Image (cartoon, rainbow, N blue to C red):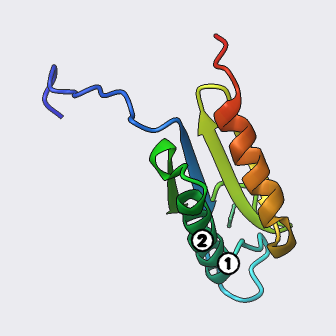
Amino acid sequence: MIPGSMDDRTPTWDLAVLVCCNQRPEGSRRGCCGREPGEALVGWLRDRSRADGLKHRMVIHRTGCLDACAGGTSVALLSASERSIVKVGPEDREAVWARVCDVLERPVTR
Ligand code: FES
């Protein structure tokens, strides 16, 4: 990077939702979230954000390991008022969406 060339921009979105889609080989000691559950969740969250008119307020991306590998798909919620990783199973989709909506409604306190 050339010194003084860093371009610092304020995001246009309020919340980044990062969904782990990391796939380790079968039998890995660390386990993994797995690609298919993460991909399915990304699609579901994007559809839901469009349906609820909130797509413009967030980015929803696939990511690699978030270092919270066991017990479901890891989802990081990152905003000015939230910094957390939640574990999500297929039955938890509505709950994670409720959490997303809660974060978007939360006032920013610094
Ligand atoms: S493999 Fe998903 S958090 Fe580590």
Residue type of the residue flagged with mark 2: Cys
- Asked which quadrant contains residue 28, the reply is bottom right
- Write down the residue under mark 1: 34
- Residue 108 at x, y percent in the picture: 64, 19
Specify which label sits upstream in the sequence, 2 or 1.
2
In this picture, is 60 found above or below 73?
Answer: above
Would residue 110 appear left or right of 97 to someone viewing this image?
left
Circles 2 and 1 in contact, beta carbons < 8 Å: yes
Number of marks drawn: 2
Q: Nearer the viewer, residue 81 or 65?
A: 81
Residue in the picture at 16% in, 23% down = 3
Q: Residues within 10 Å of mark 2 (few under 14, many from 20)?
A: many
- Residue 16 at x, y percent in the picture: 54, 45
| Residue at the bottom extreme, as displayed | 26
Residue in the picture at 81% in, 68% down = 72
Residue type of the residue flagged with mark 1: Gly
Tell me the CA gap for discs 2 and 1: 6 Å
Would residue 58 appear left or right of 110 to someone viewing this image?
left
Q: Which corner quadrant holds the N terminus?
A: top left
Q: Nearer the viewer, residue 34 or 57?
A: 57
Disc 2 C-beta below 8 A from ligand 1? yes
In this picture, is 107 found above or below 34?
Answer: above
Identify the element where label 2 is drawn. loop
- Write down the residue under mark 2: 21
Decide if residue 28 is in sight here. Answer: yes
Decide if residue 64 is in sight here. Answer: no
Q: Which corner quadrant holds the C terminus?
A: top right
User: Ligand 1 lies in which image quarter?
Assistant: bottom right
